[in-house]
């Protein structure tokens, strides 16, 4: 397992605005409040929280900071194709060890398909020893399929109700499903919960 990190960021259009926000944070302003007010990224609504991710999931310039900068120190402005970022690494794992989710959060992976029958067939394959990540990459209709179905870390209120009910109650490491939502049928495996 590669190194994982959790981070939050604020994305703005100009280097000047980014530098101004960094000064406000240095002066005691709340990072999450500034993210909610100024960030162009949808994560702004969550205080800039991006959850947990591994190498290869973010753009290079962003990742270079996340996997080298000291934890809890605001970095930036960092320029990417999206604009200018302030980045704060909130946690980083040791090589080979997963990063535990923050209190009240969970990490999960899933496979999303159109029919209940396809979902049951995939569950049988997994029970028979097939690799969850490989099946997710091959069959899942969710973009997360490319990452083996990994959804990262999230809290309550971030997923649809039927999905969330399973994630916050099912045993960790046990494949659940078929679970029906408005998106289709899911196989869900909780990978960590705190």
Image (tube, helix red, strand yellow):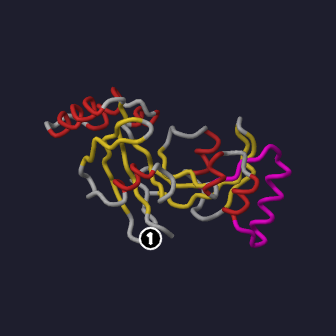
* Coordinates of residue 108 in the picture (x, y in percent): 57, 55
Residue drawn 70% across and 56% down?
136
Q: Is residue 131 above or below residue 165?
A: below
For the C terminus, which image quadrant? Answer: bottom left
Query: How far from the left and from the top, in percent, is residue 1?
Result: 51, 70
Magenta stretch holds residue 90 = no
Q: Position of residue 173 (x, y in %)?
A: 60, 65
- SS assignment at label 1: loop
Start-end of magenta stretch:
109-131
| Residue 162 placement, left or right of 38 | right
Give left or right: position of 88 versus 141.
left
* Residue holding disc 1: 97
Occupied quadrant, residue 29? top left
Give the quadrant of residue 28. Answer: top left
Residue plotted at (52% across, 39% down): 158
With respect to residue 156, does 140 lie above or below? below
Residue at point 57%, 40% (across, down): 159
């Amino acid at each position: 397992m590669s190194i994982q990190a959790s981070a939050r960021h604020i994305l703005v259009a100009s280097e000047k605005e980014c530098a101004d926000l960094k000064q406000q944070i240095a002066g005691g302003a709340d990072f999450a409040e500034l993210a909610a007010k100024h960030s162009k990224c949808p994560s702004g609504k969550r205080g800039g929280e991006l959850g947990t991710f591994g190498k290869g999931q973010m753009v290079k310039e962003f990742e270079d900071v996340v996997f080298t900068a000291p934890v809890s120190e605001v970095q930036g402005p960092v320029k990417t194709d999206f604009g200018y970022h302030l980045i704060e690494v909130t946690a980083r794992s040791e090589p080979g060890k997963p990063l535990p989710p923050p209190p009240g959060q969970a990490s999960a992976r899933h496979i999303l398909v159109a029919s209940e029958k396809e979902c049951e067939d995939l569950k049988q394959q997994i029970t028979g020893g097939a690799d969850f990540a490989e099946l997710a990459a091959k069959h899942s209709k969710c973009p997360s399929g490319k990452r083996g179905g990994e959804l990262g870390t999230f809290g309550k209120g971030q997923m649809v109700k039927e999905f969330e009910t399973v994630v916050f109650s099912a045993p960790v490491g046990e494949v659940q499903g078929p679970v029906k939502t408005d998106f289709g049928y899911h196989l869900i495996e909780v990978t960590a919960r705190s």
